[in-house]
Amino acid sequence: MLSKAEFTNSLAKRLKDLRKARGISQELLAHEAQLYRTYVNHIETGRYSPSAFVVYKIANALGIKSADILPF
């Protein structure tokens, strides 16, 4: 089982990789997901662990399923 820090860091890396693979900025992702850019940055750097609803909003903005963001 992963610790909370390991989970948050894995999620951060996965989200950043997915965003970059689609060639979009944090600012555009934040706008599409109706989030603040700084919040997206905090998620991608592992400072914040997002709620399930935020994962859903980000997945929707990326055009993928929420489960595709989870790193396991």
Image (cartoon, rainbow, N blue to C red):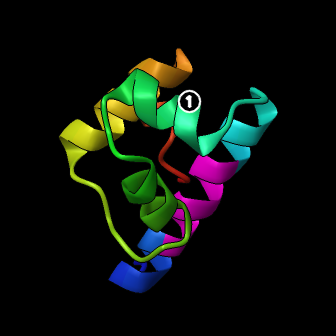
Q: How many marks?
A: 1
Residue 50 image position (x, y, % from top left): 29, 56
Is 15 located above or below residue 61 in the figure?
Answer: below
The residue closer to the viewer here, 65 or 43, is 43
Is 32 located above or below residue 15 in the figure?
Answer: above
Q: Is residue 69 magenta?
A: no
Q: Does residue 52 appear left or right of residue 48 in this picture? A: left
Circle 1 SS class: helix
Q: Is residue 65 visible?
A: no
Is 35 located above or below residue 28 in the figure?
Answer: below
Q: Is residue 13 magenta?
A: yes
Q: What residue sits 35% from the left and 46% below the top? A: 36
Q: Does residue 50 appear left or right of residue 18 in this picture? A: left
Residue projecting furthest to the top: 63
Q: What residue sits 41% from the left and 19% below the top? A: 60
Q: Amino acid under label 1? A: Leu
The residue closer to the viewer here, 56 or 3, is 56
Part of the protein shown in magenta: 9-16
Q: What residue sits 34% from the left and 40% below the top? A: 55
Q: What residue sits 44% from the left and 36% below the top? A: 30
Location of residue 47 (image quadrant): bottom left
Quarter of the rendering occupied by the N terminus = bottom left
Q: Which residue is mark 1?
A: 28
